[in-house]
Amino acid sequence: MLVAERHIIKKGHRFWAEIDNLSWQSKNLYNSANYLIRQNFIYG
């Protein structure tokens, strides 16, 4: 079972820009790691 929480932050929030940047970096890190794992799995 996965438990997740969703927090909606409006653009007017004082931390919105920082959270937006961190979430973008998190997405890119996940995609990069996923790519490397798949490449290793396919090509060994």
Image (cartoon, rainbow, N blue to C red):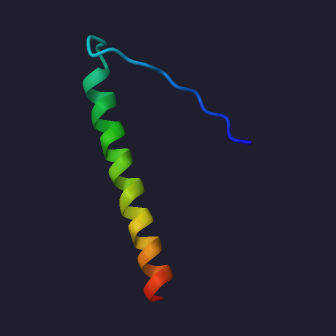
Instruction: State whether residue 22 is above or below residue 5.
Output: below
For the N terminus, the image quarter is top right
- Label count reads 0
Residue 26 in percent (x, y) is at 38, 46
Instruction: State whether residue 36 is above or below residue 32.
Output: below
Identity of the residue furthest to the top in this view: 12
Quarter where residue 3 is shown: top right
Instruction: State whether residue 22 is above or below residue 26.
Output: above
Question: Residue at horizontal 28%, vertical 14%?
Answer: 14
Instruction: State whether residue 2 is above or below residue 35.
Output: above
Relative placement, left or right, of 6 versus 24 is: right
Q: Which residue occupies the foreground of this view, 27 or 42? A: 42
Quarter where residue 35 is shown: bottom left
Residue 22 in percent (x, y) is at 33, 38
Quarter where residue 19 is shown: top left
Residue 25 in percent (x, y) is at 32, 46
Q: Which residue occupies the foreground of this view, 38 or 14? A: 38
Identity of the residue furthest to the bottom in this view: 44
Relative placement, left or right, of 25 versus 2 is: left
